[in-house]
Image (cartoon, rainbow, N blue to C red):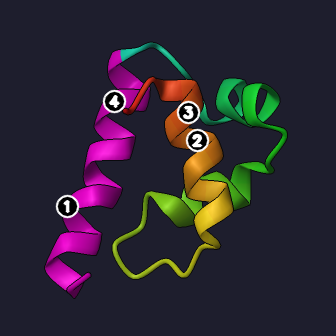
Amino acid sequence: MSNSDDATAAARRQEVRIAKGYSLEDLAVATGLTVAEITATEEPEGSTPKRHVARIENVLGFS
């Protein structure tokens, strides 16, 4: 994935989280991740394990 794809995916996760009414704290509780781990997935330059991204996207209803 290119940097622009990473940035787009990060922005999309944040947009969906906000649209669904999740605060960072709410999503942390729902995923079992920390707020810092979730924030890293929403930053274009964030380096995040794929398993964290998968947990977040599962809770947010990504296919």
Foreground disc of the pair 2, 3: 3
Give how far across and how far down residue 52 sits, in percent: 66, 57
Task: Name the residue type under label 3.
Answer: Asn
Give how far across and how far down residue 11 sits, in percent: 27, 53
Q: Earlier in the sequence, mark 3 or mark 1?
A: 1
The residue furthest left is 4
Foreground disc of the pair 4, 2: 2
Task: Name the residue type under label 1.
Answer: Thr
Question: Residue sitting at 48 percent across and 26 percent down?
Answer: 60
Residue 6 among magenta residues: yes
**Residue that mark 2 sits on:** 56
Element type at mark 3: helix
- Compared with residue 32, is residue 42 higher up or lower down, i.e. above or below? below
**Residue that mark 4 sits on:** 16
**Residue that mark 3 sits on:** 58
The residue furthest front is 63
Task: Name the residue type under label 4.
Answer: Val
Foreground disc of the pair 3, 4: 3
Element type at mark 2: helix
**Residue that mark 1 sits on:** 8
Rounded to the nearest angstrom, the CA distance separating label 2 from label 3 is 5 Å
